[in-house]
Image: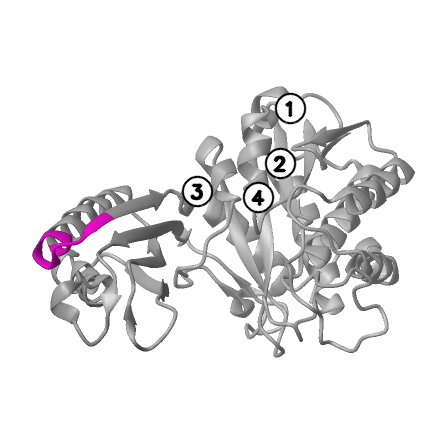
Amino acid sequence: MPVVNRIADMSADMTAWRRHLHTIPELGLECHKTSAFVAERLREFGMDEIHEGIAKTGIVAIINGQGAGPTIGLRADMDALPIEEETGVDYASTHAGKMHACGHDGHTAMLLGAAKYLAETRNFSGRVALIFQPAEEFGGGGEVMVEEGIMTTFDIAQVYAIHNAPGKDFGSFNTCAGPIMAAADTFSIHIEGKGGHAARPHDSVDPVVAACSIVQALQTIVSRNRNPRDSLVISTTQIHTGTTDNVIPETCYINGTVRTFDKAVQAMVLQRMEEIVQGQAASFGVKARLEFEFGYPPTVNDADKAAFAVHVAREIAGDGAVNSATEPVMGAEDFSYMLEKRPGAYLMLGQGEGAGVHHPKYNFNDEIAPIGASFFARLVEHAQPVSGA
């Protein structure tokens, strides 16, 4: 595998950086220790500019190349998850109830490796903007960084990111043109009936029966209102009601998620949910209120940039280890906000067998770090070659 030699020489450093970050997982926008560690490394590498405090703990670092040219953005997420770690590794989390269970420590280490190489070689024109983002899991740090103006402030023309992929072949790259990850929306339904004795249901207005009917009816949106060619998931994940066996409760709460790739499908779901909730409520004589919260939008790769990223990935991994038509997944990712503002691409980097992400036994495979860092480096050199090179 033609990993960049200089980056291969950094393997031990990237492993050390990643494992240190693994010991200090932080949540949301509160990535203070992580951000401080990243900034310290960037200063050591000789960045031309380091801008801290974006989205509270985010960083954008600039490396100038040789001569004029555009700015290419490379993004890594830094935050962890509220999970108690069960890996048993000697560099396990020292922060109780928090864990790098999605590999963001590895993503950060890969981008640091690419940063060090690019600062040393500067074999590109224009500039590189290294984006270290907090709050991918919760809080939409990508959206906050975009709202705080990073795309315009740093004149970023295109932007790329990598996510590790347990279960995918080691060192393989997987991406596609168009949507690669879904929008993630949340719905809550509040039902109010009339409580009473369970032996006298005719004196009550039962919210439990209404809730059961609403949950079942919501699934008809997928089976009867959706075009079969469109991807859609509606999952009810919580129903809370009642306190004991002989009391019909007064209220019931329903909660769940909606995953879509298309805004028209998303709008249809919201309309049909409103109609179903109100119609079912009327039929059971209860009051019901739908709350629909729009979450991360779909992650949509620009077709040309995805094809370019595939070309670079094939140089690193070989033709047989790059899937340019991977199936989109219904998970969500807030890199979507950056791709809404600038063309770019999001890729999955296979790390072989092991526990999946968001699992207490998950651990990033340090052996893929030189591969990811090499991809970032070559991406910049190919996208913005030095004039006459």
Q: Work out whether 3 lies above or below 161.
A: below
Q: Is residue 375 visible?
A: yes
Q: Is 285 one of the magenta-colored residues?
A: yes
Disc nearer the start of the sequence (2/1): 2
Look at the numbered discs 2 and 1 and tell me whether their residues touch, using CB distance below 8 Å. yes
Look at the numbered discs 3 and 1 and tell me whether their residues touch, using CB distance below 8 Å. no
Residue 61: percent from left, percent from top: 75, 33
Q: Which mark is residue 73?
A: 2
Looking at numbered disc 3 in the image, what kind of residue is underneath it? Asp
Disc nearer the start of the sequence (3/2): 2
Rounded to the nearest angstrom, the CA distance separating label 4 from label 3 is 13 Å
Q: Nearer the viewer, residue 388 or 71?
A: 71
Rounded to the nearest angstrom, the CA distance separating label 3 from label 1 is 22 Å
Looking at numbered disc 1 in the image, what kind of residue is underneath it? Phe
Look at the numbered discs 4 and 2 and tell me whether their residues touch, using CB distance below 8 Å. yes
**Dot 4: few (<14), some (14–19), or many (≥20) neighbours within 10 Å?**
many
Rounded to the nearest angstrom, the CA distance separating label 3 from label 2 is 16 Å
Disc nearer the start of the sequence (4/2): 2
Disc nearer the start of the sequence (3/1): 1
**Dot 2: few (<14), some (14–19), or many (≥20) neighbours within 10 Å?**
many
Task: Please report the residue visible at 10 percent of the width from the left and 52 percent of the height from the top.
Answer: 282
Q: Is 5 one of the magenta-colored residues?
A: no
Rounded to the nearest angstrom, the CA distance separating label 2 from label 1 is 9 Å
Label 3 sits on residue? 304
Q: Nearer the viewer, residue 187 or 381?
A: 187
Q: Is residue 177 visible?
A: no
Looking at numbered disc 4 in the image, what kind of residue is underneath it? Tyr
Q: Nearer the viewer, residue 353 or 184?
A: 184
